[in-house]
Image (spheres, rainbow, N blue to C red):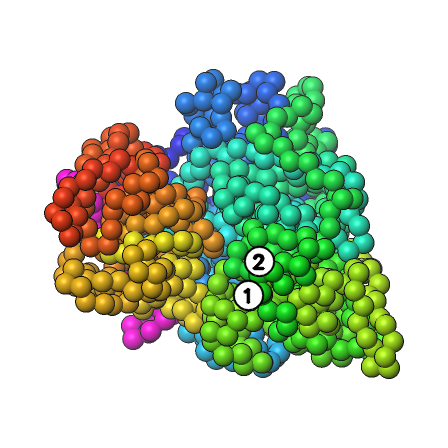
Amino acid sequence: MRSIDLASRSGAALKRAIQAKQLPSRVACASARSFSSTSSNNTGVLPPRYETLYNKYSEVRRVLGSQRLTLAEKILYSHLDNVEESLLSNTNGGRDIRGKANLKLKPDRVNMQDASAQMALLQFMTCNLPQPVIPASIHCDHLIVGSKGADEDLKAGIATNNEVFDFLESAGKKYGIDFWPPGAGIIHQTVLENYAVPGLMMLGTDSHSPNAGGLTTITIGVGGADAVEALVGAPWELKAPKILGVRLTGKLNDWVSAKDVILHLTGRLTVRGGTGYIVEYFGPGLENFSLPAMATACNMGAEIGATTSIFPFTEASSRYLKATNREQADKDAKNFENFTKGTGQDSFFKFKADEGAQYDELIEIDLSKLEPHINGPFTPDLSIPLSEFKKTVQEQKWPEKLSAGLIGSCTNSSYEDMTRCESIVKAAEQAGIKPAADFYITPGSEGIRATLERDNTLQTFEKAGGIVLSNACGPCIGQWKRQDNIPKGTPNAILTSYNRNFRGRNDGNLETMNFLASPEIVTAMAYAGSTTFNPITDSLTTPDGKEFKFPAPKGLEGPETPFEAGREVFQVQSGSPNPNVEVAISPSSERLALLEPFEPFPDSDLSGLRVLVKVTGKCTTDTISAAGPWLKYKGHLPNISENTLNTAVNAATGEVNVAYDLDGSKHTIPDLAKQWKQRNQPWLVVAEHNYGEGSAREHAALQPRYLGARIIVTKSFARIHETNLKKQGVVPLTFANEQDYDLIDAGDEVATVGLYEMLKNGGQGEVSLRVTKKDTGKVVEIKTKHAVSKDQAGFILAGSALNLLAKGN
Ligand code: SF4
């Protein structure tokens, strides 16, 4: 198939290309379920997607000869639009692909959660196409507040967000996109249960999309603009990741789980250690891993900044496919592994690395020596072994009272997780002990909820006083109305089995310390109500004065009979596109607004920019575009822009959300940005390391762009955010010399040197900043680095990637 050059194609040509292949595409992959619905055998017939995968794989083998490949490489490269072009350009004849090649990929499907789907769909709508060329799904999970329990919360959530859900549902119907209604489940759990099958490549508009790597897929978290590229059939570009191998040996001890593997790894690698890598797990230690355990490890790979994570196809994967009523998918995957059109070992596609495949980095973990870990507060890479946690709490003077324990979420709500917790709750119940801290349970999907209800697990939690929240993100994304009414600003500790713990993420209180742990550790510590309790060594006292020690948790990998589908009202709405459906957006809406295109880059370098704010410390996507109450404005760019950088720390003064105008007047950061927008004063932000880490939140790029940002200059960027900036026409630059951060301050005037030429040359060339100091008028020149590719130069020149996609439609 001919490659489509995103930077140079015209929109009309793209539209024609899409229309020409629309029907075959939809027939070939109408949904991931049908991906596996046709049986295959080793006599020459494969389901359509495996046939495509096999053919691409054969090309990869032809191009790379006898090169040994990791599992991630096999799946990733077998999704290239043009195998030869991607693997042989700038790669020393295919020998140095990793970190060098620009891969132009054709993903199999796109999954979108409700908060990010709004902007993705608004962008897709501006392309004026009748339907996406690949299957896609929308999951209503981020907008439901967790408070009193599933039924009440869901009703309230639907009442508050009806307008958005109506918009998403109508867009789903119009464009033939699967729609999972509120209460159906959290995107990653739903994808794992329904869409993930070995060998797929998926994009998800959420940073924890790699969860599906547990089922041997390559699934990458992206912003809405990337999703739109895939939806319209344009190749999606990725710098070929390096591969970090994690070899697991030994066997997990009683109190230890897969969550502890990733908590430990996050501590070793830090939030930046996985940047530019795919994490590939292998080794004899996998033998005892359930499928959801593998998904948990992949899910939290986002916390080390990894592109994605992946596990091989194991017996546990096979059992999971059967338990989720996908026997055919299991048979197809096995038959595919035995299928060949050629001769020799390499003519078979095996869902594991080739013998002798090389990893760029290799980490060995002996599971037998691993102990439970607790990570936090405020960053997921502050990893503390359980045995040292009490001492650390006391040394750091963190709160010893545990206010709440929260289990579940997309990270840890498997049958195994929940039944292990159930065993702890039952033991405590028998001893007459109730949780001393508030105890919340979030099932990941209606399927898992209904199955846990059928098997009496949820009733056990409720009997103990646990609050079962709706099948939605809730407290994990700031949608948490706490029952204990702890005032904002009060330091307090909570333990969660979630994946992320930046300040303010759970309840909007910047002083809530969220410590991440496995669900079984969270549950046991919730009974103690103490952060210094070690359930492995310490005891509680029963009401009749006896000493009680928790037995080691025990659970079942999966239910003895397959998963329940759950209630009808939470099932997927799926169908062919209906052009007669009108997408529901009220012109007076405060939640949804059609998009206006950004202006193109001028025909010259930029000049007269001013530094709006110089930020110090962590600047995550939460800092740039806060979640919680702001999630409701995700579809309304002007309204959500009111939160831009509102938790950023001013480097000059240490104040949060404070910026100073050129006349010295004091403002909030978004207020000053708005004023500068009105005055046509373009601006830039200066920041430190890993700018934009955290959720794949394209609003963190869209909002500054909407308010007038042209450049962000930092010591380093988080990968997804850097890409998102370029897609929205903002230029991300890094200091060539890190210490030059000290040479530039808020209010300084900035002109670019070489930027326009670099963009016109398709990303080739150097860029520096000419900085005129606000206070002295002195001029300093600061050298910068950039990672702008040819396609991305095209986006920036056009004003945004979307401008390029929409041109001519
Ligand atoms: Fe939802 Fe939290 Fe999972 Fe994100 S990490 S999808 S917010 S449950």
* Residue 569 among magenta residues: no
Q: In the picture, residue 558 is in which quadrant? A: bottom right
Residue 686's mark?
Answer: none
First to last magenta residue range: 583-605
Is 391 above or below relative to 710?
below
Other residues around mark 2 within 10 Å, as few (<14) / some (14–19) / many (≥20): many
Residue 513's mark?
Answer: 1
Q: Residue at x 20, y 34 (%)?
A: 754
**Does dot 2 land on a helix, a strand or a loop?**
loop
Residue pointed to by mark 2: 376
Q: Is residue 712 left or right of residue 375?
A: left
The location of residue 456, given as percent across then percent down, is 79, 72
- In the rendered structure, which amino acid carries the disc numbered 1? Met
Q: Residue at x 61, y 56 (%)?
A: 375
* Residue 604 among magenta residues: yes
Q: Residue at x 24, y 38 (%)?
A: 782
**Does dot 1 land on a helix, a strand or a loop?**
strand
- In the rendered structure, which amino acid carries the disc numbered 2? Gly
Mark 1 C-beta closer than 8 Å to ligand 1: no
Other residues around mark 1 within 10 Å, as few (<14) / some (14–19) / many (≥20): many
